[in-house]
Amino acid sequence: DLSLPRAFFARPTPEVARALIGVQLWISSGTETVAGRVVETEAYLGADDPASHAAAGVTPRSAIMFGPPGMVYVYFIYGVHHCLNLVTEPVGQAGAVLLRALEPLVGCEVMARRRAAGRSSDQALPSPDLGSGPGKLCQACGIDLAWNGLCLGPGSDPQRHIWCVRGAPARRVVATPRIGIKRARDRLLRFIDPDSDCLTRNLTSTRGDTSVPR
């Protein structure tokens, strides 16, 4: 069994965020299954990380970040996008990894159909653009708030199944500042496979440039 065990996530969050690069994410919803290779992540910590939802301690939204590890944390941002996170650290210590970008492997037609929903253009999206950003990733994978609180691996919800499988490791992993945030934006807690074409678009740091994007 190549599925990642819960112990994989019960480690320091930056360590998990780096180790997830190259891992395969599989998502089954009803009769449709998609999968992709994780190529971009960001680590979010606890009280010492002002950019984290857990910075203020346990709240109704952040409680899930305190464990157990291997839980799915989904939140809605800007009234538009969902963001998929995987909970890390031992129980009682806050941490989660935001999955920012995915390289499609299985179910590309399904991903493309989901991403096309609501678009004014009927032009087909190229494969590298299907999951090149956290909102795109969730749309392509069919992730919404109904997934929040699920455990990785087999669960009690027969309609929703999400799991991680060991894949081919990246040739190299580069750490850069996190993007799209204002607080603690200089911390090198974003991890990428710089050789991937599926990273977040239109950002100066997607190729390993450690300068803060404009």
Image (cartoon, grey):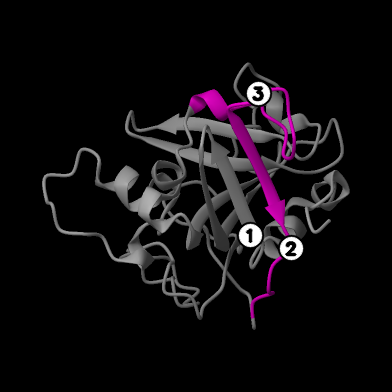
State the image coordinates of residue 151 (x, y, percent, origin top left): 72, 33
Q: Are marks 3 and 1 in contact (CB under 8 Å)?
A: no
Label 3: few (<14), some or many (≥20) within 10 Å?
few
| Residue type, mark 3 in image | Asp
Upstream in the sequence, badge 3 or badge 1?
Answer: 1
* Quadrant housing the N terminus: bottom right
In the rendering, at what x and y percent does residue 174 appear? 60, 75
Three-letter amino acid code at the position of disc 2 = Arg
* 211 inside magenta stretch: no
Q: Quadrant of residue 92?
A: top right
Mark 3 to mark 1 CA distance (whole Å): 21 Å
**Mark 1 belongs to which amino acid?**
Gln
Give yes or no for contact between labels 2 and 1 (Cβ–Cβ under 8 Å): yes
- Number of numbered discs on residues: 3
> Can see residue 50?
no
Q: What residue appears at the point 45 percent right and 43 percent down from the top-left corner?
A: 138
* Residue stretch rendered in magenta on the structure: 145-170
Which residue is farthest front?
A: 31
Tags 3 and 2 in contact by the CB under 8 Å rule?
A: no
Q: Nearer the viewer, mark 3 or mark 1?
A: 3
* Disc number for residue 24: 1
Residue 128 shows up from this direction: yes
Mark 3 and mark 2: span between their CA atoms?
Answer: 23 Å
Q: Is residue 125 left or right of residue 162?
A: left
Q: Which residue is mark 2?
A: 166
Chief secondary structure of the magenta portion? loop
Q: Is residue 150 toward the left or the right of residue 108 in the image?
A: right
Q: Secondary structure at mark 3?
A: loop
Residue 132 falls in image quadrant: bottom left
